[in-house]
Amino acid sequence: MDQVLTHSLALRSFMMMLLSIFGGLALVLASVGIYGVISVASVGNEPAKSACALALGARPADVLRMILTEGLNLSP
């Protein structure tokens, strides 16, 4: 009887596992997308800031580090 029950629920169990995997993947993709939008919005004024820094003598590596740190930091 256990075999019959397991066999009859195998397809339903597989579909639920597949649905869970796709749901988790959708959650991860949505989180990455929201993070990307927020980080782009927070780095929106970077061209002017980086141009000023370069004009005042900052090295390009320092400007790149500044942009990456502000892009990864979500606080305003």
Image (spheres, grey):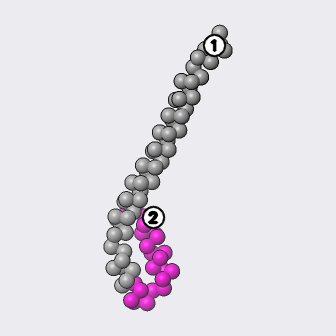
Q: Which residue is mark 2?
A: 72
Q: Residue at x 63, y 13 (%)?
A: 4
Report helix, strand or loop for mark 2: helix
Q: Residue at x 34, y 69 (%)?
A: 44
Q: Residue at x 55, y 32 (%)?
A: 17
What type of secondary structure mainly makes up the magenta span? helix
Q: What's the amino acid at mark 2?
A: Leu
Residue 75: percent from the left, percent from the top? 37, 62
* Picture layout, residue 14 above or below residue 26: above
Q: Which residue is mark 1?
A: 4
Q: Quadrant of residue 18?
A: top right
Magenta part of the chain = 53-76
* Picture layout, residue 51 above or below residue 6: below
What quarter of the picture does the N terminus occupy?
top right
Count residues near mark 1 (Cα–Cα under 10 Å), then give few for <14, some for 14-19, many for 20+: few
Q: Quadrant of residue 7?
A: top right
Farthest residue, direction top: 1
Residue 74: percent from the left, percent from the top? 40, 61
Q: Give the side of residue 52 with respect to residue 10, left or right.
A: left
Q: Residue at x 45, y 64 (%)?
A: 72
Count residues near mark 2 (Cα–Cα under 10 Å), then give few for <14, some for 14-19, many for 20+: some
The answer to whether residue 54 is magenta is: yes
How far apart marks 1 and 2 lie (CA) works out to: 53 Å
Residue 55: percent from the left, percent from the top? 39, 89
* Picture layout, residue 34 above or below residue 45: above
Report helix, strand or loop for mark 1: helix
Q: What's the amino acid at mark 1?
A: Val
Residue 47, numbered circle = none
Mark before the other along the chain sequence, 1 or 2: 1
What quarter of the picture does the C terminus occupy?
bottom left
